[in-house]
Image (tube, rainbow, N blue to C red):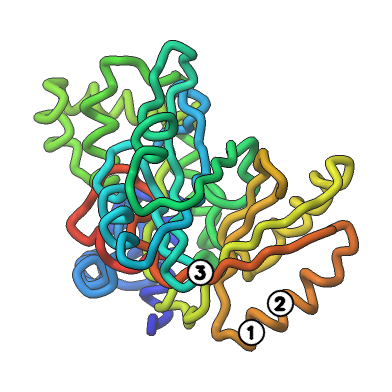
Amino acid sequence: MLDDLDRGLIHALHIDGRVPFSRVASVLGVSAQTVARRYRRLCADSGLRVVGLTDPHQVGLTQWLVRLTVTARSARDIAGALVRRPDTSWVKLASGGTEIVAVVHAPNDSASDNSLLLYDIPRTAGITAVSAHCLLHTYVGGPANWRRSAEALDEGQQRVLREAVAALGVPRQPAAVDAELLAALEKDGRTGQGELARATGWAPATVGRRLSDLRAGGALFFDVEVDAALFGVTTRALLWLSVPPSRLERVATELSGHDELAFVAATTGPTNLVAQALCRDPADLHRYLTGRLGALEEIHSLETSPVLRNLKAASPALGAGAARVRR
């Protein structure tokens, strides 16, 4: 489990994934060396990883949440193949090991073949059913983090960290010349400016300026991948909800305030809202489903799909700790 210093560091990284350890140290009242040591330990022992991600709408991508029903003997091989692909993230093994859920990043361009959705998955042996749900709007997830992993710092401490983020550059959209920069940040969002300069062939000052401009426009943001078990979570479940369209915005906004939910999004398909619940144990999940969630009369139907294991997290690029269980 985490102590107060660990939680404060993780919260600080949620606010600014590239925050200097010296600034975190001043906020937490410890030395920069202590913060750096804690960060290295969390990375090595707990799978902590900061990744730089692009806003899919600004880079011409549509996100699809794909559900695969598979035979038990083929589940691991199919899931492993999805994990290794550069166009997937959030690969999960669910429902007793016979369901795989993954986010697929597909080009908006109508001329693209979208091979994974149209050809590779339907032709794969061992898959008995496929459904694909376009993610229309994300309410929690991406830049909006799980509340329980970002509640350690008080308002004053958060203000100090947010002031630095607010002082960024001129908003710009990603361009083809940013490919090497963004690829490096997908693997490690805290890669130093010198290393990023070598990867891109730019001067360090150019790297810093381009980073500031991309972040200022929201084209680039940083996510923190960390094992939710460190926060006492032992039970994870995907919730597929059906809500009348006229009530969808109200229900989704309400769900966005639930501490139990790490992800909330509107989708296409027979269910039009999907969420991920992170709970202490099955009894805690039951209380949430029958209590806080059950109180929302606008929810017409609910399917609960237990998550057995998270095989890949937010970044499409694999890191050294990619096989670890994430949130």
Circle 3: element type: helix
Q: State whether residue 249 appears in this view.
A: yes
- Tag 1: Cα neighbours inside 10 Å, few (<14), some, or many (≥20)? some
Q: Position of residue 145 (x, y in %)?
A: 53, 56
Q: Which mark is residue 284?
A: 1
Q: Residue at x 50, y 50 (%)?
A: 129
Estimate the spatial distance between the alpha carbons at disc 2 and disc 1, rounded to whole Å: 6 Å
Between disc 2 and disc 3, whose residue precedes?
3
Q: CA distance from mark 3 to mark 1?
A: 18 Å
Name the residue at 57% across, 67% down: 305
Eye-nearest disc, 2 or 3: 3
Q: Which label belongs to residue 95?
A: 3
Name the residue carrying label 2.
288
Q: Secondary structure at mark 2?
A: helix
Tell me, yes or no, if residue 18 can be seen here: no
Amino acid at pointer 1: Asp
Q: Is residue 175 left or right of residue 233?
A: left
- Image coordinates for residue 76, horizontal then vertical, percent: 29, 62
Q: Type of residue at label 3?
A: Ser
- The quarter of the picture where the C terminus appears is bottom left
